[in-house]
Image (tube, rainbow, N blue to C red):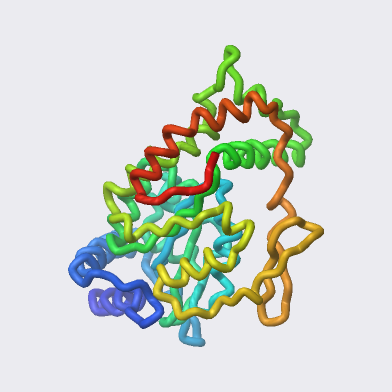
Amino acid sequence: MAAFLLGAVLLIVQPQVVPSRPAINSKAETSSQSVQRELLKKTSQKNDFKENIHSNGSCQQLPHTIIIGVRKGGTRALLEMLSLHPDIAAAESEVHFFDWEDHYRNGLQWYINQMPFSYPHQITVEKTPAYFTSPKVPERVYNMNQSMRLLLILRDPSERVLSDYTQVFYNHMQKHKPYPSIEQFLIKDGELNVGYKAINRSLYYIHMQNWLKYFPLDHIHIVDGDKLIKDPFPEIEKVERFLKLSPQINASNFYFNKTKGFYCLRDSGRERCLHESKGRAHPQVDTWLLGKLHEYFHEPNKKFFELVGRTFDWH
């Protein structure tokens, strides 16, 4: 009887194929589902696996798409914009399942419990920007679902470094804690400090190589974060096509807020903008130092362009 109930539960949590879902390879899907079943069995034995089904017919299930990064690349904006589509159900918080060991040890049941309730025709999405630069994550995602569709949003590496610093700086200011100037991080012995973590996170080709060991390039859609800021609609259209979604998001869903200096969203007559922490002004950086950043990223950017067969308008 227990085996029968477990089998019924596994059928419920598996993604159902519907027209608006990503097209997947049946052979890969079978292998992926087999791995998921084994993980769920282990989880059910440990945590007394339960059916997470709402009375309205919705349920919690594993994500069909993950926004894997990059940190300070525009992941929150991408998720909010994508959530305008009625066939998208998005997790509200960054889950950190695959990159935090304490979370990963909890198993897939815990992961499912972090997901939103969604209907059979919807795509469940979660985003955790740290996934892209975490070495263990690609293999772990692959082991869960070999057919996973991944979204990666990138921006000019130099600008991303400045945004990275800006976020940490304001986090310290809010806690009334002092924080060094950006020059103290970027300069070491009169030269660019290439050991600075924010710089390493911007070496996209290194991290992309790790993901391409497990997922083909056509399963990873790269969103141009700089273009998303300047003109969001064309970028979101591309995401809709990648996820095989019906075109539901329109140019009228976006409007430029002159006060904030970036695009906000209009959904069913209701207007909303990203949190005030988004779009903060970067610190003033000496022209010489900016030049050093641009020079340093020239070769890594070139390698990344060759790796993905696409160029971006970066310094």
Q: Residue 239, how many percent across, how many down?
A: 47, 67
Residue at left offset 34%, top offset 48%: 211
Q: Tell which residue pokes out farthest to the bottom in this image.
A: 56
Q: Residue 35, how many percent across, how many down?
A: 24, 61
Q: Is residue 259 above or below residue 134?
A: below
Residue at left offset 37%, top offset 57%: 220
Q: The C terminus lies in which quarter of the figure?
A: top right
Q: Residue 52, how many percent across, how many down?
A: 44, 75
Left or right side of 101 for 27: left
Who is closer to the viewer here, 91 or 17? 17
Q: Residue 150, how many percent across, how many down?
A: 40, 59
Residue at left offset 45%, top offset 46%: 100
Q: Quadrant of residue 156?
A: top right
Q: Is residue 35 above or below residue 306?
A: below
Q: Tell which residue pokes out farthest to the top in this image.
A: 189
Who is closer to the viewer here, 295 or 52? 295
Who is closer to the viewer here, 307 or 281? 307
